[in-house]
Amino acid sequence: MNGLEPLTKQMMSSNVEVQCNAVGCMTNLATHEDNKVKIANSGALGPLTMLAKSKDMRVQRNATGALLNMTHSDENRKQLVKVGAVPVIVSLLSSTDPDVQYYCTTALSNIAVDPENRKSLAKNEPRLVSQLVRLVGFSGSPRVQCQATLALRNLASDVNYQLEVVQSGGLPHILQLLKSAQSPLVLAAAACLRNISIHPSNERAIIDAGFLEPLVELLGRFDHEEILCHTVSTLRNLAAVSEQNKLEIVEAGVVQKFNEKVLTAPVSVQSEITACLAVLALGDELKDKLFDLGIINVLVPLTKTDNIEVQGNSAAALGNLSAKISSYKPFIAAWTEPDGGIQDFLVRFLTSKELTFEHIAAWMILQLLESEDRKLKELFLATPEILDNVERLAARRVGEVRGDEAYDAKQAITELAKKILLLLKSQ
């Protein structure tokens, strides 16, 4: 009925009551998805931005609520940036009103989804992170704390913000939320921590801030799929670079929790856990401990799941475990059990027609044979399915297109297969 134009005019009224009702009407209209683009194109965003600075708290609440409703699409966020709404929203983080704080933190969380907006915020809003950190730590409203944390999470999609959250004192406040009994707060904190932990410079700071024990507790305290994914991904990030970090993570009891959960967990959680185990299995000093914790008995069945990512991660973890170890008894013990054991896993991967899987299997066989363990060699020689497929890969025609990714992968597998055959034929 062409009501946007007269409503916009009424927002510009000098009467505060009229302003309040007109903006409130616009806020409600903006809850409907089909209306948002029309509102953005109607010229209403400028007046809404101006009224967000109103001295009347009712007008301010309605205006910031309307601006929040306009941040749910990429195009509308661009329009808000154009009319100068972002600096106003940032300035209102210091409001004493919990509703205004909530609308503004949520709006900023949505705005920070876009890479270009993050660049603009980094350039023009130098105090943004410290303001959000203050709200995470000292807001009396759990929903404000939650949205401020999610805003930090979205900002921390960028490297510089990952560092800045830590440098601005964010870790102690995130740690407190991680220990909360309220799952929305825990989810926000876990998601934020996951992004912060991506930066290698933050790994040690996070561990030193006391996060390991609460992260391990989360694995047993919640069955919430997203919380578990963020938690495990954080642990993997923390383990990525440092051998010391890997050791501390294992000593904190992470592997025991993984073993308890992984076989019955949702696929997304299985994928994160197996990826983390693959990273931990790179630690040369940890391998004996991982064997003692029964990690092979968990990884072998996971190579048979329907999900290709879980299969690949599990196989990569087994492959990482096979290199540079003091004793190969764990592989001998698991040759046929559980679920067909190492033998069945290697046959399946050699015949999978997935080049990555073929490579993992061939590389692992080579590692096992290079150990010069006589019993292992006997097991290979007594398994014709493995021998036949290694010979097939060694004789496979690679193709003519050199430099092609598939050519390079097949060439590498063929070379591995030839080395395996030489070792098997040697005395």
Image (cartoon, rainbow, N blue to C red):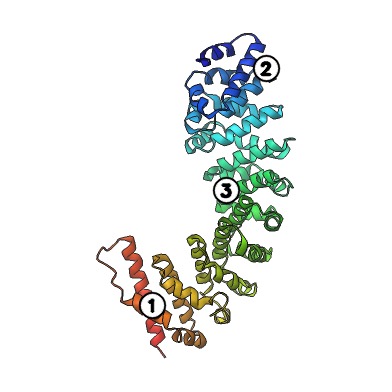
Q: Could you say which quadrant of the image residue 395 lies in?
A: bottom left
Q: Nearer the viewer, residue 129 or 66?
A: 66
Q: Answer with mark 1 or mark 2, whichever residue precedes in sequence.
A: 2
Say which amino acid is labelled 1: Asn
Residue 389 numbered tag: 1
Going 66% across and 32% down the picture, which residue do you hit?
102
- Side of 102 relative to 337 (left or right): right
Going 65% across and 72% down the picture, which residue do you hit?
293
Asked whether the beta carbons under mark 1 and mark 3 sit within 8 Å of each other, the answer is no
The vertical placement of 46 against 72, above or below, is above
- Few, some or many C-alpha atoms within 10 Å of disc 1 (few <14, some 14-19, many ≥20)? some
Residue with the most extreme front position: 1
The vertical placement of 253 against 4, above or below, is below
Say which amino acid is labelled 2: Lys
Q: Nearer the viewer, residue 43 or 278?
A: 43
Going 67% across and 40% down the picture, which residue do you hit?
146
Residue 235 numbered tag: none
Q: Secondary structure at mark 2?
A: loop
Q: Answer with mark 1 or mark 3, whichever residue precedes in sequence.
A: 3
Q: Secondary structure at mark 3?
A: helix
- Residue identified by numbered label 3: 195
Give how far across and how far down residue 126 sits, in percent.
57, 34
- Residue identified by numbered label 2: 55
Say which amino acid is labelled 3: Asn
The Cα atoms of the two marked residues, 3 and 2, are separated by 37 Å
Residue with the most extreme bottom position: 427
- Few, some or many C-alpha atoms within 10 Å of disc 2 (few <14, some 14-19, many ≥20)? few
